[in-house]
Image (spheres, rainbow, N blue to C red):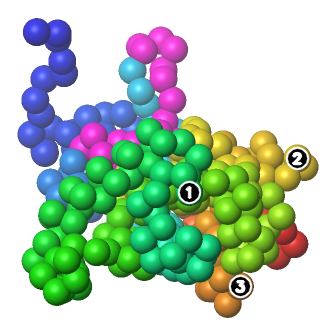
Amino acid sequence: MPETKSFCTYEQQLQILKRRGLSIADDTLALQWLREKNYYRLSAYSLTLRRKNPSTGEDEFLKDSSFSTIIDLYQFDEQFRAAISHAAAIAETNLKAYIAYYHARQYGPVGYLDGNHFEDPWRHAKLLNGLSKSLGLRKDEPFVLHHHKDLNDVYPVWVIVEVLTFDQVSMMYRNLLPEDRAAIAREFYGISSREYIENWTHCAVVARNIAAHGSRFYHRQRVNPPARMPKPINSYGTKPFGYVYALWHLLPIPDRSAFVNAVHDCFIAHPSAQLSELGFPDNWLDILTVH
């Protein structure tokens, strides 16, 4: 087996932090956080507070770094993830509604079963296979049970979108015929280029997954896929700000201000968090007003 670091008790973990120069005002509180959050998880929020000592090769904390700053950054990320999750939930619901309405209008309630209405037959088959599995997992839900028992297992598109995950419905959109993707982009999002909606919905799924699994946005070096942005600001597309930008555009106009305010509140409530550590430009509020 490869060699790993030795096990350390909470008290030993605390001493390691102190030895490396971290200021800890309340040992009891620090031990509680180490016990409840995991040393390794917390240490990710100290990356911007420490550097490697060239003499010893060991990490050491920068002057005036404190455990309270780590807590503040951790809590910032929690609040930021909540803002992302809320916006992504709205984007998911809207995408499902738009696809269901458009596709039923164009091809009928069960037109989604016909592979000719999709660009790639293999991806369409994958969608139907995933749908079958999802219906099986949710067979006891009243609306699924109703269509199974009373309607001979005929599921209109407005029903199946409620069974599909955000990831599945995003892939469904990206596999619609190009002219249908373009029509949905124009009619429901007011965007002339379908490529933006294809990318933004993908980004929204990834952002939602990061948030749902409690992963870290703060000091994240890169997001993938990069968010599609206009040329003057496309360098921000590889950072978490790119995903904020994508989500903002997917939201109905009345929800956009609330999302911006929720993100802004994260920085106000947690002054330790730096805009640059999430790839936010200084004028990010102006960008989300103009674009």
**At numbered mark 2, what does the secondary structure look like: helix, strand or loop?**
helix
Q: Callout 1: few (<14), some (14-19), or many (20+) C-alpha neighbours within 10 Å?
A: some
Q: Nearer the viewer, residue 203 or 36?
A: 203
Q: Is 240 a magenta residue?
A: no
| Residue 157 against residue 34 in the figure, above or below | below
**Numbered tag placed on residue 117 in the rendering:** 1
Residue type indicated by callout 3: Ile
Q: Position of residue 60 (x, y in %)?
A: 43, 31
Residue type indicated by callout 2: Lys
Q: Position of residue 114 (x, y in %)?
A: 46, 57
The tally of labels here is 3
Q: Evaluate whether residue 67 shows in this view.
A: no
Q: Nearer the viewer, residue 285 or 226?
A: 226
**Numbered tag placed on residue 47 in the rendering:** none
Q: Nearer the viewer, residue 57 or 2?
A: 2
The residue at 41%/60% (across/down) is 113
Question: Residue tagged by mark 3?
Answer: 253
Q: Earlier in the sequence, mark 3 or mark 2?
A: 2
Q: CA distance from mark 3 to mark 1?
A: 30 Å
Segment tinted magenta in the rendering:
39-57
Q: Earlier in the sequence, mark 3 or mark 1?
A: 1
Using residue 51 as the reference point, say whether residue 267 is left or right of it: right
The residue at 22%/73% (across/down) is 153
The residue at 48%/20% (across/down) is 53
Of circles 3 and 1, which is in front? 1
Q: Callout 2: few (<14), some (14-19), or many (20+) C-alpha neighbours within 10 Å?
A: few
The residue at 73%/68% (across/down) is 183
Question: Residue tagged by mark 2?
Answer: 231
Q: Earlier in the sequence, mark 1 or mark 2?
A: 1
Q: Which residue extends farthest bottom?
A: 254
Q: Quadrant of the N terminus?
A: top left
